[in-house]
């Protein structure tokens, strides 16, 4: 068709095509169509003022953070937007680990190529919204701040937002003094930096958003978001499976560059401890797709009591053909009574025996012990508190932690310990279960891990889910316990 055009028409067509390309290039947020976790993060500010996207490498976390920030700076919110909408210009920060990485990553994503000034406006902030750019002294091509046009809900320009660039290497004092509406932290911050950022947004009821891969392991900031979230805090984790732009060939090439002990972190955004982990096996070795447990498989349950910290329960099943132990279900709730926990237990389709720790015998203010309270609620507690299987030198097992850790580790090594994909809380705790500097297991956010140890080490009391009437319970039998498979 273009062959029939005269020279003037062709020139006009080329000009229009170029204008269209430039409109797309210099209006990135207008072209942004998020997927899955990206939209969740953008929408999270509707009810949360602290938001964390903890993601694997190459998933698009910085890309997403820049576009969310640009929407707030400009007031140009897309139709699908369900999160916070500022109604007037904002004062914002964007911060990274160092001045150089902030320039090369955050500045580039928001403004465009730091070196090529002709590309200014090709980042997340549209070119026609860039009012002024203040250069950072003594840092080549680095920007101190950007002045951005802000538009109201009708698209009318009503003022200017300002975003300034910071870096963690500047120190805590550089994060003091200002009052902010919005802060975007694109790398994992130290606790003191994060606390200062929260303080800066306090009087304006502002927002702090973080986007990073957890390369520093289970820091206090991550610990809180994963295991002790408060009202107003939001966490989304994203891995390669949530990144459609990565094809299988690209994943394979990138994966080959990573060490085995860091693959969970880099592909799934899962913090790891390396040599500090209690169980030095990646979740890839343990997690399996959920499946229906055959009725003849033995079942066992484990509970760890809590109130301020969660009461945690795991349900386990044992494959009789090879002895493989499966974690099939989980439960974790804080500040609930035994009655409320019992309702959750009884709601399960099967009611295996439940192993419980020795503190279940304690009484408070002359009342019934926890074990008695649960039994009164119809829960199938074992008659005695948990003990490890006795070895040849013992008549009764002890309650030490080490034998259970050793036994579970050996099962994992042999491929005889698995966990269902649906047990997400269990997988989170597993990633944070670690030894402290004193060589002892850190007893924080370890509730499901403790329940797992009680269940695994109590397999001798396990029972099938059906036809229980045909078999006596082991603790009711007159026969020797040696007839049951002890786990050592």
Image: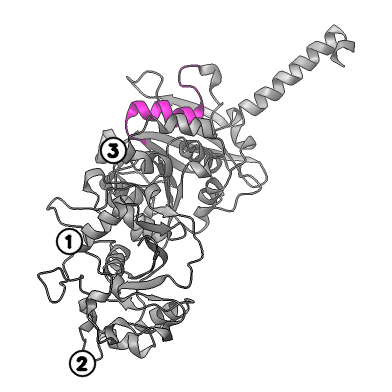
**Residue 374's x, y, as percent?**
33, 85
**Residue 320's x, y, as percent?**
39, 66
| Secondary structure at numbered mark 1 | helix
Please give the label number shown on residue 402: 1
Q: Which of 457 and 334 is in front in this view?
A: 457
Return the residue at label 2.
366
Q: Pointer 3 and pointer 2: residues touching (CB < 8 Å)?
A: no
Please give the label number shown on residue 126: none
Per the image, is 74 magenta? no
Task: State the predominant SS element of the stretch in magenta.
Answer: helix
**Numbered disc in front, either 3 or 2:** 2
Per the image, is 100 magenta? yes
Alpha carbons under labels 3 and 1: distance apart: 46 Å
Up-down: is 181 above or below 6? Answer: below
Alpha carbons under labels 3 and 2: distance apart: 55 Å
Q: Does residue 304 show up?
A: no
Up-down: is 375 above or below 178? Answer: below
């Amino acid at each position: 068709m273009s062959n029939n055009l005269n020279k003037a028409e062709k020139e006009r067509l080329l000009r229009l095509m170029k204008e269209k390309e430039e409109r797309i290039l210099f209006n990135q947020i207008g072209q942004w169509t998020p997927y899955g976790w990206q939209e969740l993060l953008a929408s999270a500010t509707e009810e949360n003022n602290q938001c964390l996207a903890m993601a694997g490498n190459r998933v698009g976390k910085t890309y997403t953070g820049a576009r969310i920030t640009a929407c707030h700076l400009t007031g140009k919110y897309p139709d699908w937007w369900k999160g916070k909408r500022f109604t007037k210009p904002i004062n914002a920060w964007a911060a990274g680990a160092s001045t150089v990485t902030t320039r090369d990553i955050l500045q580039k994503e928001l403004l465009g190529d730091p070196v090529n000034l002709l590309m200014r406006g090709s980042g997340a902030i549209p070119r026609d919204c860039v009012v002024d750019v203040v250069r950072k002294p003594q840092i080549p091509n680095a920007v101190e701040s950007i002045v951005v046009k802000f538009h109201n809900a009708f698209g009318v320009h009503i003022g200017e937002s300002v975003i300034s660039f910071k870096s963690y290497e500047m120190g805590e004092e550089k994060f003091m003094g200002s009052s902010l509406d919005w802060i975007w932290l694109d790398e994992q911050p130290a606790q003191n930096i994060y606390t200062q950022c929260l303080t800066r947004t306090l009087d304006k009821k502002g927002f702090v958003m973080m986007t990073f891969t957890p390369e520093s392991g289970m820091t206090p900031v991550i610990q809180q978001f994963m295991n002790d979230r408060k009202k107003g805090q939001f966490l989304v984790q994203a891995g390669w499976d949530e990144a459609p732009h990565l094809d299988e060939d690209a994943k394979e090439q990138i994966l080959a560059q990573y060490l085995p002990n860091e693959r969970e972190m880099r592909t799934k955004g899962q913090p790891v401890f390396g040599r500090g982990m209690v169980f030095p096996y990646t979740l890839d070795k343990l997690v399996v797709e959920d499946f229906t447990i055959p009725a003849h498989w033995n079942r066992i349950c484990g509970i760890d009591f809590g109130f301020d910290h969660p009461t945690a329960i795991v349900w386990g099943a044992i494959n009789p053909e090879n002895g493989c132990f499966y974690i099939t279900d989980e439960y974790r709730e804080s500040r609930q009574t035994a009655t409320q926990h019992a309702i959750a237990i009884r709601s399960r389709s099967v009611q295996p025996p439940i192993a419980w720790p020795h503190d279940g015998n304690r009484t408070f203010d002359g009342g019934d012990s926890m074990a008695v309270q649960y039994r009164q609620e119809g829960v199938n507690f074992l008659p005695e508190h948990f003990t490890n299987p006795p070895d040849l030198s013992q008549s009764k097992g002890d309650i030490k932690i080490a034998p259970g850790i050793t036994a579970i580790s050996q099962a994992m090594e042999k491929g005889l310990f698995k966990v269902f994909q649906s047990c997400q809380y269990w997988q989170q705790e597993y990633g944070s279960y670690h030894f402290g500097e004193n060589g002892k297991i850190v007893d924080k956010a370890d509730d499901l891990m403790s329940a797992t140890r009680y269940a695994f080490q109590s397999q001798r009391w396990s029972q099938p889910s059906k036809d229980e009437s045909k078999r006596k319970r082991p603790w009711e039998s007159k026969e020797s316990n040696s007839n049951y498979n002890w786990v050592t």
